[in-house]
């Protein structure tokens, strides 16, 4: 089983070692170099390929009262083989707060995708 890390602090989002996964592999979303006060919410608008559990509820939350990275999330054995696009809404901690509401215009929005495949990832030159 392989593990990929999705770093949300880079532009564009980066994957280590890459965005390709097989059933049973694990995925970790990380706030990377965002400051400690940052928070993020990750959603999959067209279907989630990751298993959801009480310890990893969906949507996935990072930062704030949560860790700066998710615990390893397992690619479901029943996930269809395709790219699962995700959206990340990130508050770097500098947004203006009024009555616990964050100014949505100051949030950082990023997206990416996790490619579920049964084939091993291709070697990159």
Image (spheres, rainbow, N blue to C red):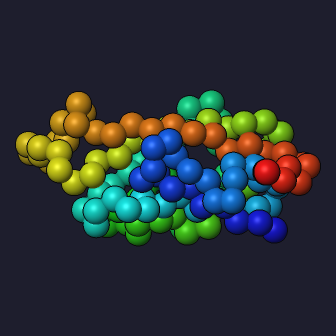
Of residue 123 and residue 85, the one placed in the foreground of this image is 123
User: Is 115 placed left or right of 91 in the picture?
Assistant: right
User: Quick one: which residue is furthest to the right in this view?
Assistant: 119
Q: Residue at x 28, y 62 (%)?
A: 35
Total of numbered circles in the picture? Answer: 0
Q: Residue at x 60, y 61 (%)?
A: 5
- Whole-percent x and y of residue 65? 31, 66
Q: Quadrant of residue 24?
A: bottom right
User: Is 37 placed left or right of 20 in the picture?
Assistant: left
Q: Residue at x 62, y 67 (%)?
A: 72
- Whole-percent x and y of residue 93? 22, 54
Q: Is residue 63 visible?
A: yes
Q: Is residue 121 visible?
A: no
Q: Quadrant of the N terminus?
A: bottom right
Q: Is residue 30 above or below residue 118?
A: below
- Whole-percent x and y of residue 82? 78, 36
Q: Is residue 7 above or below residue 46?
A: below
User: Quick one: which residue is furthest to the front in this view?
Assistant: 125
- Whole-percent x and y of residue 21? 77, 53
Q: Residue at x 78, y 45 (%)?
A: 116
Of residue 114 and residue 49, the one placed in the foreground of this image is 114
């Amino acid at each position: 089983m392989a593990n990929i890390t999705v770093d949300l602090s880079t532009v564009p989002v980066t994957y280590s070692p890459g965005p390709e996964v097989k059933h049973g592999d694990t995925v970790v979303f990380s706030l990377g170099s965002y400051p400690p006060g940052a928070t993020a919410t990750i959603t999959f608008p067209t279907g989630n390929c990751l298993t959801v559990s009480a310890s990893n509820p969906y949507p996935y939350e990072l930062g704030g009262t949560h860790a700066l990275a998710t615990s390893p999330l397992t690619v479901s054995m029943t996930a269809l083989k395709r790219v699962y696009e995700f959206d990340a809404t990130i508050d770097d901690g500098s947004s203006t707060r009024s009555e616990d509401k964050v100014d949505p215009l100051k949030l950082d929005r990023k997206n990416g995708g996790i490619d579920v495949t049964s084939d091993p990832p291709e070697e990159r030159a």
